[in-house]
Image (cartoon, grey):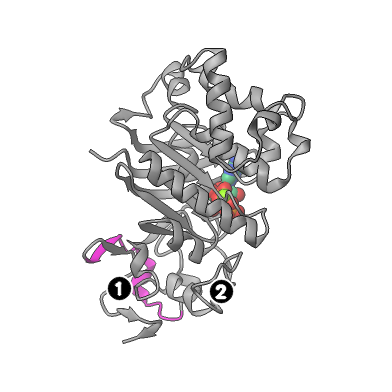
Amino acid sequence: MALVEIHNLRVRFETDEATIYAVNGIDLMVEPGQSIGIVGESGSGKSVSVTSIPRLLPRTARVEGSVYFNGKDMMRATASELQAIRGHQIGMIFQNPHAYLNPTRTIGKQLMEPLLFHHLAGVKRARAMGMEMLDRVGIVNPKARFDNYPFEFSGGMLQRVLIAMALITGPKLVIADEPTTALDVTVQAQILRLLKEMQRELGMSMIFVTHDLAVASQVSDVIYVMYGGIVVERLPAKQLIRVHRHPYLSGLLASLPRVDEPVGRLPFIPGLPVNTRQPLSGCPFYARCQWHLDQCQSAPPLTLVERDHEAACWLADERRVANGQPS
Ligand SMILES: Nc1ncnc2c1ncn2[C@@H]1O[C@H](COP(=O)(O)OP(=O)(O)OP(=O)(O)O)[C@@H](O)[C@H]1O
Ligand SMILES: [Mg+2]
């Protein structure tokens, strides 16, 4: 059985002014030990999708579909069951460590917290594990650093601390949502290497959310491309550059200066983004797609186009794109 199984997940937000259709029916699977990359432009529903797994969405979210984690039906889990899973079996790393660390408490105390909260260790053992973890994520002199406060660390070091906090309980899954976006390129490369090493070493599964196609292909086995709250393409990371089918992904790849180098934000594709205030009808990429047909006003399903590769495009079969060139 897969570690994460999401079927037909739909999320909308009921705000005072409007209903926001954030996720419009996605399926996602993560096998034990597997690393999944989710890429897509801002507002495509990446964070809302992954936040649905530990059920951490705000109260205004209306969630439909099914989410299973380690065989557990997360949609029916009780508050205490969810609490037992979050921060223990699911570790989370986000973009801005400052938002998740308490400035008035030492790094060591915050690092020990998940172990103490989930009764995985006593104080003495938690302290030893905390220092060991700091050492493993590359913090020099962890003994002295343990009693430092967050302001005494640089951004890159704080991100290492956040990784240590997420991994200290030995989670089955780590969710990393843009964990390196705020860092400069060199530090970003170090953190990515570290995450990948730890993921392999601990045998965890990982879901890695990013705007950066090169980063996604570096850290993941399988890539999900999201657009307008749906998955428009799912393919093995190794195939990303060679064989892709959806015009959105082709557009992204075609506008990259160099696909084997980190490029930061996704390149710009002309046209208006999807209006999330209306229910999705038809292909979300319709208005921006240079190949669109009348048929595209009805939603193309995500269909297998070859082994381990799915695309949601009526033209996917004809659009076998090799080395960026339609054939
Ligand atoms: N709490 C909320 N209330 C209302 N709308 C929301 C809320 N959270 C997210 N949304 C909307 O849902 C849609 C998807 O948001 P999401 O944060 O998942 O995008 P994203 O792909 O992670 O984008 P980014 O790359 O900018 O992080 C967006 O239109 C966003 O404005
Ligand atoms: Mg996001």
Q: Is residue 200 above or below residue 126?
A: below
The residue at which mark 1 appears reads as: 316
Residue 114 versus residue 164: which sits nearer the camera?
A: 164
Give the position of the N terminus as an image quadrant: top left
Q: Which residue shows up at 54% across the image and 47% down it?
A: 177
| Residue 118 drawn at (x, y percent) | 48, 17
| Residue 23 drawn at (x, y percent) | 46, 48
Q: Is residue 21 above or below residue 54?
A: below
Q: Is residue 222 above or below residue 71?
A: below
Q: Which mark, by number, is residue 269?
A: 2
Q: Which residue shows up at 38% across the image and 46% down it?
A: 200
Quick one: label 1, few (<14), some, or many (20+) residues within 10 Å? Answer: many
Q: Is residue 160 above or below residue 117?
A: below
C-beta proximity under 8 Å, tags 1 and 2: no
Disc 2, SS: loop
Q: Which residue shows up at 70% across the image and 30% down it?
A: 144
How many marks on residues? 2
- Magenta span contains residue 291: yes
Q: Image check: 39 left or right of 267?
A: left
